[in-house]
Image (cartoon, helix red, strand yellow):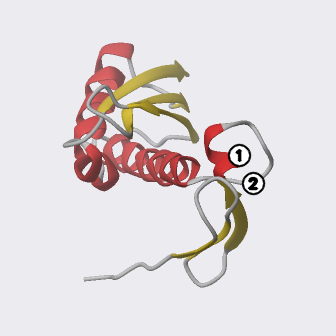
Amino acid sequence: MAIRTSTAQWEGDLKAGKGTMTVGKGAYTGPFSFASRFEESPGTNPEELIAAAHAGCFSMALSNGLAKEGFAPKRVNTKADVHFGPDPAGGFHVSKIELTTDAEVPGIDKAKFDKIVDETRVGCPISKLLKGGAEIMVKANLKT
């Protein structure tokens, strides 16, 4: 079993502090702060990294699902919108993830495509990980 590792360092208190996150073996290193997480300041945040992980996983898993059904996708592009905000029970939470997928798949009909998309929505490893704490929705667009 593979073990994947990323790291984060935070210095200071929540509002005045700052941090750095590194993905994997240094494929990405970037700053994050209160302002980049709760406002629209430069830098990244954990939710954007979750969005990137989910979009990447979903695109790969959908491509695999299509191929297993005999359809060779030319391209699968997925955007993940992670909804992050106040939790009615206190604190903050991720309430929903919306995946929007544009796929170019010759020879497939919309019903079959939608079936494979829905199977992928619940079956990709990151969806499985997140399904307990966030609603996972998919908006899928097919281009043939």
Q: Please report contact status of discs 1 and 2: CB closer than 8 Å, yes or no.
A: yes
Residue under pointer 1:
35
The answer to whether 91 appears left or right of 19 in the picture is left
Q: Which residue lies at the image location 55% right of the left edge and 51% below the top edge?
A: 52
> Which residue is most to the left?
132
Q: Which residue lies at the image location 31% right of the left edge and 44% below the top edge?
A: 65
- Number of residues whose C-alpha sits closer than 10 Å to that of mark 2, classed few (under 14), some (14–19) or many (20 or more): some
Residue type at mark 1?
Ala
Asked whether 9 or 97 is in front, the reply is: 9
Vertical comparison of 124 with 119: above or below: below
Asked whether 72 or 116 is in front, the reply is: 116
Image quarter of residue 16 = bottom right
Image quarter in which the C terminus is found: top right
Q: Which mark is residue 117?
A: none
Rendered location of residue 84, percent (x, y):
47, 34
Vertical comparison of 30 with 73: above or below: below
- Number of residues whose C-alpha sits closer than 10 Å to that of mark 1, classed few (under 14), some (14–19) or many (20 or more): some
SS at badge 1:
helix
Rendered location of residue 24, percent (x, y):
55, 78
Query: How far apart are the alpha carbons under marks 1 and 2?
Result: 9 Å
Image quarter of residue 121 = top left
Residue under pointer 2:
43
Identify the mark nearer the N-term, 1 or 2: 1
Instruction: Count every numbered label the image shows and give the total.
Output: 2
